[in-house]
Image (cartoon, rainbow, N blue to C red):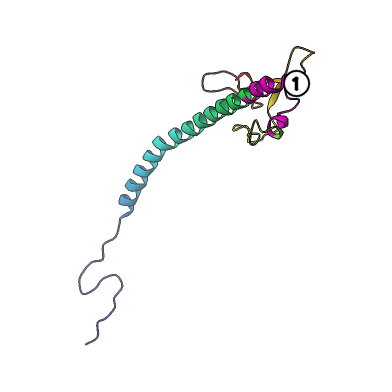
């Protein structure tokens, strides 16, 4: 005996599905959860970039100090820190995503030329209202 294949109703049984109202309720719940989660996600990304920037600046400043301590002179460029292996690689600014945007501060003493400090070249302010160029 062959079994007939039926679409929709089969011998009086009703095929159940989701109504439009049920789908709209589920979509509203998902949208509400997304509205809560997305701002937190972007806020944590911003905080992570700022933390990475502070860490990168600290590492580069420490490398400049070690360079000066070892050689008695400041590096002429940030690439000198990499060439002399004080850094493995010049980090990219996490806000501008480029290693070319670092702002170098020359030494005030003309007898010891070179880079004394480094700052971010990013525009804007951190979460505390301090410009990135002052970090």
Up-down relation of residue 69 to residue 1 (above or below): above
Q: Residue 84: x percent and y percent?
A: 70, 32
Residue drawn at (68%, 33%) of the image: 82
Q: Residue 10: x percent and y percent?
A: 24, 73
Left or right of 27 on screen, residue 70: right
Q: Residue furthest bottom?
A: 1
Identify the image quadrant of residue 101: top right
Q: Is residue 66 magenta?
A: yes
Q: Which residues are magenta?
A: 63-82
Left or right of 91 on screen, residue 34: left
Q: Residue 55: x percent and y percent?
A: 55, 27
Residues 25 and 127: in front is: 127
Q: Main secondary structure of the magenta part?
A: helix
**Count of numbered marks:** 1
| Image quarter in which the C terminus is found | top right
The residue pinned by badge 1 equals 114
Q: Is residue 119 magenta?
A: no
Residue drawn at (73%, 24%) of the image: 75
């Amino acid at each position: 005996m062959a079994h007939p294949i039926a679409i929709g109703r089969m011998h009086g049984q009703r095929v159940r599905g989701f109504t439009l109202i049920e789908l709209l309720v589920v979509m509203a719940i998902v949208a509400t959860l997304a509205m809560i989660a997305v701002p937190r996600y972007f806020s944590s990304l911003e905080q992570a970039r700022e933390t990475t920037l502070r860490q990168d600046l600290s590492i580069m400043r420490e490398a400049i100090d070690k360079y000066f301590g070892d050689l008695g002179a400041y590096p002429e460029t940030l690439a000198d820190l990499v060439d002399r292996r004080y850094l493995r690689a010049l980090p990219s600014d996490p806000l501008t995503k480029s290693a070319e945007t670092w702002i170098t501060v020359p030494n005030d003493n003309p007898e010891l030329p070179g880079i004394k400090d480094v700052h971010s070249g990013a525009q804007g302010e951190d979460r505390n209202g301090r410009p990135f160029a002052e970090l």
